[in-house]
Image: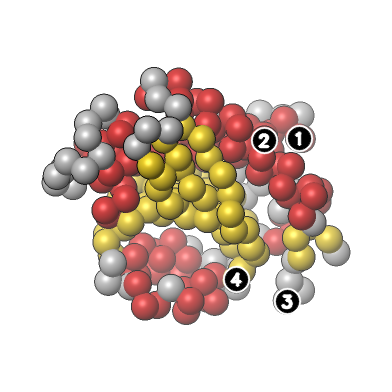
Amino acid sequence: MKTATIRNDALQKYLNETFVQASAHLSALTGKEISISRYFLNFIEGDRFIRENRSSDDAAYFASILKLRDIVHMDVVLLISEAEGVALYNILSGEDPEADMAVNDDVIAGIGEVNNILGSCFINVLADKYSVEGHPTTPINTFDMLGAILEEILLQHEYLDKVVLCADVLLREKQMGQFHVRFMVISPQEQLPDALIDD
């Protein structure tokens, strides 16, 4: 299978538009100054992604999956570790980021709302590019061991030989610090926007 190469200029512009929108929406939702910056971006196949994260299989993670089936066949996935997810939830809910918080349905749904905003912004920018409407599903939210999450997303949905566009981003809140979030866009390579890859 031919592997895509990143067109840095086009992809950076595309992701920048997404993150600007998402920052504005997250800030409006929380009443806080939240910004998003990308510091790593890569195309990687699903089986390699699983291998490279094998050492963290037993770590607890929040995951949220947003599916899109009308513009292109695409799943947008947000992953964040338990500790950073709880701290981020505390900020979103107006609590001290260092406060103890048991993981419950409210926390899981709150992290899912971050993906609802981030993933929807990604899809909206894509829809604007194609001049069509995109209708993502309601996020599917979970909290589990990272190995189980990746197996569910990549293995059972037959993405092992598909290209994963993986962006590691930082969510920053002006007064309370920053949070590492992994943001993945899973799509068959042939359906990725032409403007984002070189043949």
Disc 4 to disc 3: CB gap under 8 Å: yes
Q: Amino acid at mark 4?
A: Glu
Residue at the spot x=40%, y=47% of the render? 179
Q: Earlier in the sequence, mark 1 or mark 4?
A: 4
Q: Give the x, y percent position of residue 26.
A: 45, 29
- For residue 43, side relative to residue 87 (left or right): right
Give the Cα separation between the discs numbered 4 and 3: 10 Å
Q: Label 1 belongs to which residue?
A: 129
State whether residue 94 is above or below residue 144: above
Q: Residues within 10 Å of mark 1 (few under 14, many from 20)?
A: few
Q: Earlier in the sequence, mark 2 or mark 4?
A: 2
State whether residue 132 is above or below residue 194: above
Give the Cα separation between the discs numbered 2 and 4: 25 Å
Q: Earlier in the sequence, mark 2 or mark 1?
A: 2
- For residue 113, side relative to residue 137 (left or right): left
Q: Label 3 belongs to which residue?
A: 1
- For residue 196, side relative to residue 94 (left or right): right
Disc 1 to disc 3: CB gap under 8 Å: no
Q: Amino acid at mark 3?
A: Met
Q: Earlier in the sequence, mark 2 or mark 3?
A: 3
Question: Is residue 167 visible to the viewer in this orientation of the structure?
Answer: yes
**Which of the pair 36/47 is nearer the observer?**
36
Q: Amino acid at mark 1?
A: Lys
Q: Label 2 belongs to which residue?
A: 17
Q: Residues within 10 Å of mark 2 (few under 14, many from 20)?
A: some
**Which of the pair 46/102 is nearer the observer?**
102
Give the Cα separation between the discs numbered 1 and 4: 25 Å
Question: Which callout, 2 or 4, points to the residue nearer the camera?
Answer: 2
Question: Which callout, 2 or 1, points to the residue nearer the camera?
Answer: 2
Question: Is residue 137 visible to the viewer in this orientation of the structure?
Answer: no
Q: The residue tagged with tag 4: helix, strand or loop? A: strand
Q: Among all residues in the image, which is located at the extreme right?
A: 199
